[in-house]
Image (cartoon, rainbow, N blue to C red):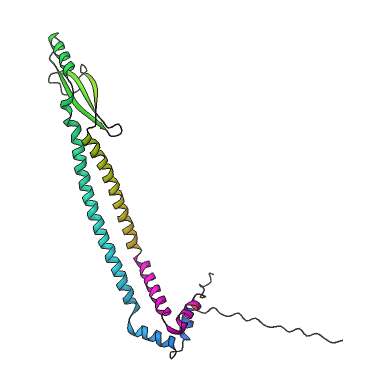
Amino acid sequence: MATKTTKTTAVVARPTRTAADLLQHVDPNSTLGQSLFNIAATFDKADVVAVMTTRREEDLHVQKLDAQHRLDQLTSKGRDLKAAYDAIGPSLIGQIDLTSAKAAAVALTAAGFGQFEARSSFESTDDKTQTYRFSVSIAAVGQTGYDSEKHDRHVTIPFTSEAASLLKQMRDNNNDVQEVQMELVRNKQEVANLPAYARRVHARMVEDTLKSIGSGQGEAMLQSLGGVKALPIG
């Protein structure tokens, strides 16, 4: 009876090649080797990265200055708008009708209860209802503090067209302020990311340079480097 012989083939695991391994085996006389040599002799990649990073940093600085200038202008405009807006309410106090209050003050004085007078004062501005609130009072002459005998009633006056316009301008201005503030936040984040930007510039420059090498050797190297694995953990 014949004996059947089984043939086995040993599988040898290939070690993972690193980028350094690939570069070490490049023939210096080949097109790829000459191209890499010429590139290294012509310029220092670190210098190019520094130039690009500096340009980006300068652009971001100019953008920051522009945004800060616009923010200062908007802030100043906001203060002016609010000052004009706040002045309207008190300026309308002359529109309050004190006829009945004055008559009551005269009657109280004539009845011997003391010297009374009619007063009006501005109290508040209500942005939601767009009205001004005033108080009308009958108080003892010379009384400046709390008077238990003072009789008050309240009067509201609707916004003038100027007040309504100023309120809208203030709200629009506040929205613009928030947008510029967000620009400054994004600018700060981009400045913090400049190291990552430098790494991307360096990587893109090397990649484009390798791709420019003739006969597809540079592209082939990039494909090979794509198989490089990270070191195992542990």
Magenta stretch contains residue 205: yes
Q: Residue at x 18, y 16 (%)?
A: 100
Residue 66, above or below 220? above
From the viewer's side, name the closer residue of 81 and 147.
81
Residue reaching furthest top?
111
Spot occupied by residue 83 in the image (x, y as percentages of width and height): 19, 39
Spot occupied by residue 116 in the image (x, y as percentages of width and height): 14, 16
Spot occupied by residue 90 in the image (x, y as percentages of width and height): 18, 31
Q: Which residues are magenta?
A: 194-223
- Picture quadrant of residue 3: bottom right
From the viewer's side, name the closer residue of 215 and 103.
215
- Picture quadrant of residue 157: top left
Spot occupied by residue 225 in the image (x, y as percentages of width and height): 49, 77
Residue reaching furthest bottom?
29
- Picture quadrant of residue 185: bottom left
Name the image quarter holding the N terminus: bottom right
Task: Count up the numbered dots.
Answer: 0
Q: Left or right: 107 with respect to 32? A: left
Residue 186, above or below 216? above
Name the image quarter holding the C terminus: bottom right
Residue 116, above or below 214? above
Q: Left or right: 101 with respect to 187? A: left
Name the dominant secondary structure of the magenta segment.
Answer: helix
Q: Left or right: 7 with respect to 128? A: right
Q: Left or right: 43 with respect to 124? A: right
Residue reaching furthest front?
161
Q: Residue at x 21, y 46 (%)?
A: 77
Residue 30, above or below 100? below
Magenta stretch contains residue 214: yes
